[in-house]
Amino acid sequence: MPTDLMAYSMDIVEYFRSPRLQVALDLLSSSKALKIARQVKESVDIVEAGTPLIKAEGIKVVSRLKRALPGKLILADMKTLDVGWIEVCMAADAGADIVSISGLAPNEVIEESVKAARQKNVIIEADLLGVKEQVTRAAELKKLGLGIVCPYSNRSRKEQDQLRKQSQHGEEDR
């Protein structure tokens, strides 16, 4: 899906019916993130400006990724919990095609985020990290107008913890 055709009203279900590969740039340096993004751009569909990257470099990093990777979908991993309208507009104005919000956010924040996304022509993704009843919350989020949910499993959290421990002990990440 070329980003110039990206519109919230498009049938995103059709686009995501096929597997899509996303790279998460959960780094602190935009120069490192851009280097990795350029190396993998032919192999991925979505490039994520991770939460740590946005916090360290500011929302402008989304603009830098967008300029460096024309035609790629850029996801701004905002993990919004409040001020949904403001954060979605910030990310969209910076060039994000997809904006993530927290599935833990109150429904009012979800609703204002969806309204902003429709106005700005971007897709909202709900990150279900920390949500206990993920299937139930996903159904609620769908009713509120979200197009994508990103579930988490205990296994992925355990794997992350294991990798963190390995790197703290000087072992190679596998």
Image (cartoon, helix red, strand yellow):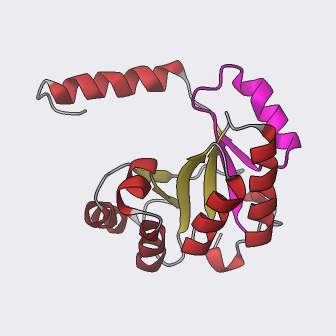
Residue reaching furthest to the right: 143
- Which quarter of the picture shows residue 152? top right
144 lies left or right of 158:
right
> Percent from the top left, x then y, of residue 141?
80, 39
113 lies left or right of 21:
right
Tell me if I can see residue 13 in this picture: no
Q: Is residue 148 magenta?
A: yes
> Percent from the top left, x then y, of residue 165?
24, 22
> Percent from the top left, x then y, of residue 150?
62, 39
Residue 48 drawn above or below residue 6: above
Residue reaching furthest to the front: 83
Residue 157 drawn above or below residue 38: above
Which residues are the magenta region?
121-149
Which residue is painted at 72% across and 50% down in the image? 17
Query: Is the C terminus in the top left, top right, bottom left or bottom right quadrant?
Result: top left
Nearer-the-camera pick, 106 or 134: 106
Nearer-the-camera pick, 21 or 68: 68
Which residue is painted at 61% across and 49% down in the image? 19
The number of discs equals 0
Which residue is painted at 47% across and 67% down in the image? 62
Tell me if I can see residue 50 in this picture: yes
Residue 49 drawn above or below residue 102: below
- Which quarter of the picture shows residue 58? bottom left
Which residue is painted at 68% across and 36% down in the image? 103
